[in-house]
Amino acid sequence: MTRLAGGLLTAAAACFVALAAALPAPAAAAMDPLSDEAIDARIRTHRTSDVTLTVLDAAGKPLAGKTVTVRQVRHQFLFGCNIFRLDPTDTSAAQEAYQDRYKALLNYATLPFYWGAFERREGTTETQRIRAMAEWCKARGIRTKGHPLCWHTVKPRWLEGKTLGEVKRLQLGRITRDVTAFKGLTDCWDV
Protein backbone atom coordinates (compact mmCIF):
# COMPACT_ATOMS: atom_id res chain seq x y z
CA MET A 1 0.00 0.00 0.00
CA THR A 2 2.85 2.41 0.81
CA ARG A 3 4.48 1.73 -2.53
CA LEU A 4 1.22 2.46 -4.35
CA ALA A 5 0.61 5.64 -2.35
CA GLY A 6 4.16 6.82 -3.05
CA GLY A 7 3.74 6.08 -6.75
CA LEU A 8 0.45 7.99 -6.87
CA LEU A 9 2.06 10.90 -5.06
CA THR A 10 4.96 10.95 -7.52
CA ALA A 11 2.56 10.76 -10.48
CA ALA A 12 0.47 13.63 -9.09
CA ALA A 13 3.59 15.76 -8.54
CA ALA A 14 4.73 15.07 -12.11
CA CYS A 15 1.33 16.19 -13.44
CA PHE A 16 1.52 19.46 -11.52
CA VAL A 17 5.05 20.15 -12.80
CA ALA A 18 3.95 19.44 -16.39
CA LEU A 19 0.91 21.69 -15.99
CA ALA A 20 2.98 24.53 -14.53
CA ALA A 21 5.52 24.24 -17.35
CA ALA A 22 2.74 24.54 -19.93
CA LEU A 23 1.40 27.81 -18.52
CA PRO A 24 2.48 30.97 -20.36
CA ALA A 25 5.20 32.86 -18.49
CA PRO A 26 5.12 36.64 -18.12
CA ALA A 27 7.48 38.37 -20.57
CA ALA A 28 9.95 39.45 -17.86
CA ALA A 29 10.11 35.97 -16.37
CA ALA A 30 10.68 34.45 -19.82
CA MET A 31 13.72 36.65 -20.39
CA ASP A 32 17.11 35.26 -19.36
CA PRO A 33 17.98 37.41 -16.29
CA LEU A 34 21.63 37.57 -17.40
CA SER A 35 20.94 38.62 -20.99
CA ASP A 36 22.02 42.07 -22.11
CA GLU A 37 18.38 42.89 -22.80
CA ALA A 38 17.31 42.00 -19.24
CA ILE A 39 20.23 43.86 -17.71
CA ASP A 40 19.49 46.98 -19.78
CA ALA A 41 15.81 46.80 -18.77
CA ARG A 42 16.74 46.69 -15.07
CA ILE A 43 19.16 49.60 -15.52
CA ARG A 44 16.41 51.68 -17.18
CA THR A 45 13.95 50.77 -14.41
CA HIS A 46 16.14 51.08 -11.34
CA ARG A 47 19.14 53.26 -12.16
CA THR A 48 18.06 56.00 -14.54
CA SER A 49 15.59 58.85 -14.53
CA ASP A 50 14.73 61.91 -16.57
CA VAL A 51 16.04 65.25 -15.41
CA THR A 52 15.64 68.83 -16.58
CA LEU A 53 18.64 71.11 -16.18
CA THR A 54 18.63 74.86 -16.51
CA VAL A 55 22.13 76.22 -17.09
CA LEU A 56 22.59 79.77 -15.87
CA ASP A 57 25.11 82.44 -16.80
CA ALA A 58 27.13 84.39 -14.21
CA ALA A 59 24.19 86.77 -13.72
CA GLY A 60 21.81 83.89 -13.02
CA LYS A 61 19.97 84.06 -16.36
CA PRO A 62 19.22 80.87 -18.32
CA LEU A 63 21.56 80.22 -21.24
CA ALA A 64 19.83 79.37 -24.50
CA GLY A 65 21.21 77.54 -27.51
CA LYS A 66 24.35 76.30 -25.76
CA THR A 67 25.74 72.79 -25.82
CA VAL A 68 26.14 71.31 -22.37
CA THR A 69 28.11 68.16 -21.60
CA VAL A 70 27.37 66.36 -18.34
CA ARG A 71 29.76 63.74 -16.99
CA GLN A 72 28.88 61.61 -13.98
CA VAL A 73 31.84 61.76 -11.61
CA ARG A 74 30.58 59.42 -8.91
CA HIS A 75 27.83 56.97 -8.19
CA GLN A 76 25.29 57.27 -5.44
CA PHE A 77 25.86 53.55 -4.90
CA LEU A 78 29.19 52.14 -3.72
CA PHE A 79 30.78 49.52 -5.99
CA GLY A 80 33.75 47.78 -4.46
CA CYS A 81 35.66 44.78 -3.26
CA ASN A 82 38.78 44.11 -1.24
CA ILE A 83 41.92 45.92 -2.30
CA PHE A 84 44.28 43.61 -0.45
CA ARG A 85 46.67 43.27 -3.43
CA LEU A 86 47.29 47.02 -3.71
CA ASP A 87 50.91 48.08 -3.25
CA PRO A 88 51.30 51.79 -4.06
CA THR A 89 55.11 51.39 -4.08
CA ASP A 90 55.09 48.62 -6.72
CA THR A 91 55.63 49.99 -10.24
CA SER A 92 55.38 46.64 -12.04
CA ALA A 93 53.11 46.36 -15.07
CA ALA A 94 50.87 43.91 -13.21
CA GLN A 95 50.41 46.28 -10.24
CA GLU A 96 49.79 49.26 -12.53
CA ALA A 97 47.16 47.24 -14.41
CA TYR A 98 45.54 46.26 -11.10
CA GLN A 99 45.45 49.90 -9.96
CA ASP A 100 44.12 51.16 -13.31
CA ARG A 101 41.32 48.58 -13.41
CA TYR A 102 40.41 49.12 -9.76
CA LYS A 103 40.03 52.88 -10.06
CA ALA A 104 38.23 52.58 -13.42
CA LEU A 105 35.63 50.10 -12.14
CA LEU A 106 35.20 50.67 -8.41
CA ASN A 107 34.61 53.51 -5.93
CA TYR A 108 34.78 51.52 -2.69
CA ALA A 109 37.62 49.48 -1.17
CA THR A 110 37.85 47.10 1.76
CA LEU A 111 41.17 47.39 3.61
CA PRO A 112 42.61 44.37 5.50
CA PHE A 113 42.56 44.72 9.28
CA TYR A 114 42.54 41.02 10.23
CA TRP A 115 44.28 41.26 13.59
CA GLY A 116 46.40 38.13 13.11
CA ALA A 117 47.96 39.56 9.94
CA PHE A 118 47.83 43.23 10.97
CA GLU A 119 49.76 42.68 14.22
CA ARG A 120 51.67 39.39 13.93
CA ARG A 121 53.93 40.43 16.81
CA GLU A 122 52.46 42.36 19.71
CA GLY A 123 53.02 46.08 19.17
CA THR A 124 54.30 45.72 15.58
CA THR A 125 51.52 46.63 13.15
CA GLU A 126 50.93 47.01 9.44
CA THR A 127 49.62 50.56 9.99
CA GLN A 128 52.10 52.20 7.59
CA ARG A 129 51.36 49.76 4.74
CA ILE A 130 47.58 49.91 5.16
CA ARG A 131 47.70 53.69 5.59
CA ALA A 132 49.49 53.98 2.22
CA MET A 133 46.67 51.93 0.69
CA ALA A 134 44.03 54.18 2.30
CA GLU A 135 45.83 57.32 1.12
CA TRP A 136 46.05 55.92 -2.42
CA CYS A 137 42.31 55.32 -2.36
CA LYS A 138 41.48 58.74 -0.93
CA ALA A 139 43.59 60.50 -3.59
CA ARG A 140 41.47 58.77 -6.24
CA GLY A 141 38.08 59.39 -4.64
CA ILE A 142 37.69 55.76 -3.54
CA ARG A 143 35.91 55.41 -0.19
CA THR A 144 37.36 52.82 2.18
CA LYS A 145 36.23 50.61 5.01
CA GLY A 146 38.33 48.64 7.46
CA HIS A 147 37.60 44.92 7.73
CA PRO A 148 37.44 43.46 10.36
CA LEU A 149 38.30 44.97 13.70
CA CYS A 150 37.26 41.89 15.64
CA TRP A 151 37.08 38.37 14.29
CA HIS A 152 37.55 35.16 16.19
CA THR A 153 39.24 33.15 13.42
CA VAL A 154 42.11 35.45 12.40
CA LYS A 155 43.68 36.35 15.70
CA PRO A 156 47.35 36.86 16.51
CA ARG A 157 49.12 33.82 17.93
CA TRP A 158 50.56 35.91 20.73
CA LEU A 159 47.04 36.07 22.23
CA GLU A 160 47.19 32.35 23.01
CA GLY A 161 47.48 31.68 26.72
CA LYS A 162 46.09 35.07 27.73
CA THR A 163 43.01 35.26 29.92
CA LEU A 164 39.67 36.31 28.48
CA GLY A 165 39.98 39.59 30.42
CA GLU A 166 43.40 40.28 28.90
CA VAL A 167 42.15 39.48 25.39
CA LYS A 168 39.18 41.81 25.84
CA ARG A 169 41.42 44.64 27.09
CA LEU A 170 43.87 44.15 24.21
CA GLN A 171 41.04 43.91 21.66
CA LEU A 172 39.38 47.13 22.84
CA GLY A 173 42.77 48.84 22.86
CA ARG A 174 43.46 47.62 19.34
CA ILE A 175 40.11 48.91 18.10
CA THR A 176 40.67 52.35 19.66
CA ARG A 177 44.26 52.52 18.33
CA ASP A 178 43.41 51.57 14.75
CA VAL A 179 40.19 53.56 14.37
CA THR A 180 42.00 56.63 15.73
CA ALA A 181 45.02 56.10 13.45
CA PHE A 182 42.79 55.96 10.35
CA LYS A 183 40.40 58.78 11.24
CA GLY A 184 39.64 60.78 8.11
CA LEU A 185 40.92 58.01 5.84
CA THR A 186 38.66 55.15 6.88
CA ASP A 187 35.46 56.05 8.69
CA CYS A 188 33.55 52.85 7.99
CA TRP A 189 34.41 49.65 9.84
CA ASP A 190 33.29 46.05 10.08
CA VAL A 191 33.58 45.13 13.75
Image: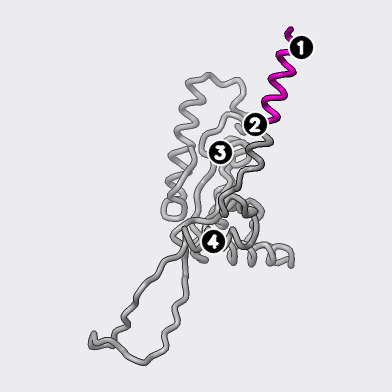
Query: What crowding class fits label 1: few (fewer than 14 Cα within 10 Å), some (14-19), or many (20 or more)?
Result: few
The residue where tag 2 is placed is 16
What's the CA distance linking mark 4 and mark 2?
A: 32 Å
Q: Is residue 27 left or right of residue 8?
A: left
Q: Is residue 78 left or right of residue 99?
A: left
Residue 95: quadrant of the picture: bottom right
Q: Which residues are magenta?
A: 1-15
Could you say whether the residue bearing mark 2 is in a helix, strand or loop?
Answer: helix
Whether tag 4 and tag 1 are in contact, CB under 8 A, the answer is no
Mark sitting earlier along the chain (3/4): 4
What's the CA distance linking mark 4 and mark 1?
A: 49 Å
Tag in front: 3 or 4: 4
Residue 3: mark in rendering: 1
The residue where tag 3 is placed is 123
x, y percent for residue 154: 62, 33
Residue shown at the point (45%, 44%) measured from the top left: 179
Query: What crowding class fits label 4: few (fewer than 14 Cα within 10 Å), some (14-19), or many (20 or more)?
Result: some
**Amino acid identity at mark 2:** Phe
Could you say whether the residue bearing mark 4 is in a helix, strand or loop?
Answer: helix
x, y percent for residue 53: 34, 77
Query: What crowding class fits label 3: few (fewer than 14 Cα within 10 Å), some (14-19), or many (20 or more)?
Result: few
What's the CA distance linking mark 2 and mark 1?
A: 20 Å
The residue where tag 4 is placed is 41
Could you say whether the residue bearing mark 3 is in a helix, strand or loop?
Answer: loop
Q: Is residue 43 left or right of residue 36?
A: left
What's the CA distance linking mark 3 and mark 2?
A: 66 Å
Image quarter of the N terminus: top right
Residue shown at the point (63%, 51%) measured from the top left: 84
